[in-house]
Image: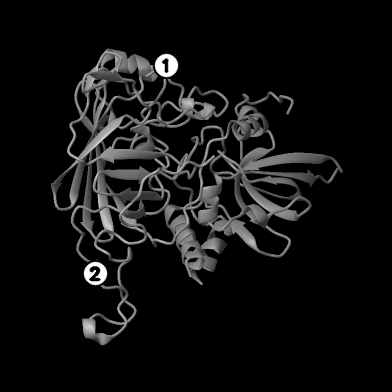
Amino acid sequence: MKAKVVAALVLAGVVTLSVPLFAHHGTAAFENEKKVTVKGTVTEWLWSNPHCLLQFDVKGDDGKVAHWVGETQNPVSMTNVGWSKAAIKAGDEVTVTILPVKNGLTLGRVVSVLLPNGKTLISGEGASREVRDEIERQVREGTSK
Amino acid sequence: MVLVPALVFSSSALGQSGRPQQAPVVKDQKSGVAKGQKAAPAAAPRHDLSGTWEPADGPSEGIQIDGVKAMPNDGKPEHQLPYTPYGLQAYKSHRALAGADENLPGFNNDPRDKCEPLGFPRMNFYNLRETQILQNEYKVAILYEYGTVWRVIWTDGREIPKLVDGGVLIGKEVKEPRYYGYSVGKWVDDTTLVIQTTGMMGEDRVWLDTAGRPISDQVRVEERIHRLDHDHLEWTVRIDDPKMYTKPWVAMNRFPMKLENPRRDVMEQYCSLTEMENYNKVFASPASTPAGQKPER
């Protein structure tokens, strides 16, 4: 129940921004308090280091397609919050919440992904330390049973 | 290729005490502990660090993105390092991706991003995650998750090699510097191993941390690993590098680790140049472009 509550807080943007999670670089390139939510079609989910990359196409009202690239943390950190290589596949219709880069390009840090099956993956980006710890704890308990 | 140390260890899933590596869970009233609560951890076994350990305050605590845990490069006066003029010059030549002088992802010169070995002591300060410690009567081996890297610490009574021009002196032979140096450990009491390490690569090959602090081939590192009880240890690291710093200082101060389930399968966290180049091309370089410019991707 507590995990659902914290997930809801993240998605609603209620939880204040906190220390960045990234293990590879800082956050100078990003808007750290401005989230964008877009719907699109996954073109690639790359499970790789130093960051996993989610690429997807978003069709605008004018019919033009914008190609987005979202980075998450590395596979180890993403596994700690319940993601996996098999969780997302090309062709999936997804809703992605992202912290965009400052230069206006369609790039950013992924906060969450709503999957076609209704499940939402939370990255922990844009969440407080407490929320991240709770997500990690829930995942660890689930995998260690 | 994943390399495995060719060592035969006296214990694998069990510590040298023969005790499972988890706190026992109370099942009845005989212990006097309420149901559902864990009993207090057992005492630390003597001269035994073996087990799979992870940061006690959460898996992300050992990432140390802004620099060494006890002295992060966050601009606070109390975290300023005592650079020598040469050390400060070396720091300023580093374009780090984190810390007080952070650069954008497309503009850095961290040897890590070329998948060069991190070396020691940086292994302790970069993505210190699930860490396996194995030991026998001659040596202690520390197996890091990042890079599938291990170090061997000799506990057979040998002396720490002497630093000389070109490397270290072992007997009458000068041996080459190593990324992970030459380590010797001594038990100073039943539960504390003090490790001295020297003979590392120079500043042209390695950094101290992700915030771009420097380290040289003249460094002597002292680690103190103290097992508090069966399930917890503290890890302290002291840096003595007269080439870079005017006095010794503590980079990791009693960093807490807790014992994991011995059956836990530790993941790989690796650096692949192929994946790094793809990441830079697809994400880091365009993300670092100044506002208003739209480079081809």
**Quarter of the view holding residue A83:** bottom right
Amino acid bearing label 2: Ala
Please state the horizontal and vertical placement of residue B179, each as a whole percent of the image: 38, 28
Point out residue A95 in the picture as x, y percentages from the top left corner.
70, 54
Residue at position x 22%, y 66% in the image: B42
Q: Is residue B118 left or right of residue A49?
A: left
Are the two marked residues, 2 and 1, in contact with CB atoms closer than 8 angstroms?
no
Q: Nearer the viewer, residue A24 or B266?
A: B266
B255 w.r.t. B258: above or below: above
Left or right, B10 with respect to A138, comes to left
Q: Chain of mark 2?
A: B
Q: At numbered mark 2, what does the secondary structure look like: helix, strand or loop?
A: loop
Q: Is residue B21 above or below residue A13?
A: below
Label 2, label 1: how far apart the Cα atoms are: 50 Å
Q: Label 1 marks which chain's residue? A: B
Q: Residue at x 70, y 59 (%)?
A: A115
Query: In which quadrant of the rendered view does residue B100 lie?
Result: top left
The x, y position of residue A10, in whole percent, is 55, 57
Q: Which mark is residue B93?
A: 1
What residue sits right under mark 2 in the picture? B40
